[in-house]
């Protein structure tokens, strides 16, 4: 049976952006309903130690940070539903949001905070060590600090990989950069930075067969894609920088997306090309991708939504 209800502000997604949007929207009496999605809390639910979120001088576990944000949002009246959005219709107002493929919700405004998902090599050893927080990471800025003075490896040949390799080179003893092709895809400026960093060793034409270690990374087994020769490197940390997928499949054809699938917002705002639909966090940010910038953009989205609703007379 289909059910339907009218909601002033629906927030789709539940990471730092979604929860912060919920806190601001609830305090503005927008009575937000959050559709938390299939992975409530987003990427931080699989992160153990978060040391760079302001206000936690001793660091905080990722799931604990998300739980704190959820409690704060609920304290002001946010309703959190552990459901998923199966389709949206932004062609007329109120907007239509279908959850769990059956229930239709009507919304006066929508904030999208569905985030992005890191791409992985999908090796059994990589995923096992990632799940136990054993030194496999997709964010050098988040986790590089834990490998200060040690040897690490990073996989990837684009701008992000080059940028993260030079970031790691400042704090780690040695950085192996594992690149499948015999060249970097990164911009000339980034290539130059990598090539002029003494403690980065380039391993072109190599791919990772296995990440070694039981409770933590101890090395990686690599294969030369041209010769088939294998080699082992000793490392304490293994970083993957082969890109992210923005979680926007449900919005294709409904909103303006860039060539990589990120939602386009009007610069300086959280407004999408559809009036009354806003986007915040990693789903529209491929540059910074930090919990704190996601939270900040969640605040922007809620303020934009509140002002927009007020201008339409339904606040």
Image (cartoon, grey):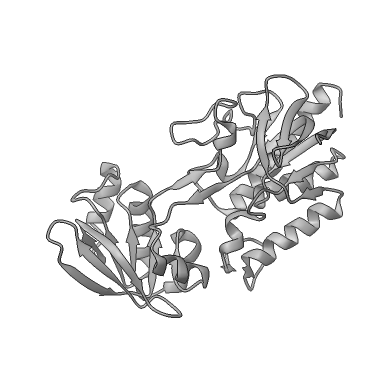
- Number of labels in the image equals 0
Check the image and report above or below for 232 versus 206. Answer: below
Residue drawn at the location 35% of the way across and 53% of the way down: 161
Q: Does any portion of residue 313 appear in the rendered image?
A: yes
Residue 268, position as x, y percentages in the image = 60, 32
Q: Residue at x 45, y 59 (%)?
A: 138
Note whether residue 304 is visible. Answer: no
Quick one: which residue is furthest to the front in this view? Answer: 1
Depth order, front residue of 16/6: 6
Residue placed most toward the observer, 310 or 38: 38
Q: Give the left or right position of residue 70, taking residue 28 as reference.
A: left
- Give residue 231's quadrant in the image: bottom left
Q: Looking at the image, which residue sits at the far bottom?
A: 215
**Front position in the image: 269 or 218:** 218
Q: Is residue 254 above or below residue 240?
A: above
For image coordinates 47% across by 72% down, the residue present is: 146
Rendered position, 149 above or below 103: below
Image spot of residue 313 (x, y percent): 86, 22
Provide residue 267's location: percent of width, then percent of height. Answer: 57, 30
> Looking at the picture, does residue 255 appear above or below residue 152?
above
Q: Residue 70 appears in which quarter of the rendering?
A: bottom right
> Front-most of 278 and 269?
278
């Amino acid at each position: 049976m289909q059910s339907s209800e009218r909601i002033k502000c629906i927030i789709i997604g539940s990471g730092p952006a979604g929860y912060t949007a919920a806190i601001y929207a609830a305090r503005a009496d927008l009575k937000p309903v959050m559709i938390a999605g299939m992975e409530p809390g987003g990427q931080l639910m699989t992160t153990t130690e978060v040391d760079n979120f302001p206000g936690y001088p001793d660091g905080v576990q990722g799931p604990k940070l998300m739980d704190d944000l959820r409690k704060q949002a609920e304290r002001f009246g946010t309703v959190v539903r552990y459901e998923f959005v199966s389709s949206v219709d932004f062609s007329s107002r109120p907007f239509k949001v279908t959850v769990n493929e059956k229930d239709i919700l009507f919304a006066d405004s929508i904030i999208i905070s569905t985030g992005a998902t890191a791409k992985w090599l999908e090796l059994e050893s990589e995923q096992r060590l990632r799940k136990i927080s054993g030194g496999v990471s997709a964010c050098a800025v988040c986790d590089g600090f834990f490998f200060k003075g040690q040897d690490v490896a990073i996989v990837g040949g684009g701008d992000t990989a080059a940028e993260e390799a030079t970031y790691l080179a400042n704090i780690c003893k040695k950085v192996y950069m594992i690149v499948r092709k015999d060249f970097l895809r990164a911009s000339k400026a980034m290539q130059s930075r990598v090539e002029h960093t003494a403690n980065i060793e380039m391993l072109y034409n190599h791919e990772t067969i296995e990440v070694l270690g039981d409770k933590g990374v101890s090395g990686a087994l690599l294969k030369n894609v041209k010769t088939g020769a294998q080699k082992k490197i000793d490392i304490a940390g293994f970083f993957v920088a082969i890109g992210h997928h923005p979680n926007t499949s449900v919005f294709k054809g409904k909103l303006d997306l860039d060539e990589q699938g990120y939602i386009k917002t009007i610069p300086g705002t959280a407004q999408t090309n559809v009036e009354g639909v806003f986007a915040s966090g990693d789903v529209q940010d491929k540059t910074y991708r930090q919990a704190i910038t996601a939270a900040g953009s969640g605040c922007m989205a809620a303020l934009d939504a509140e002002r927009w609703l007020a201008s339409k007379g339904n606040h």
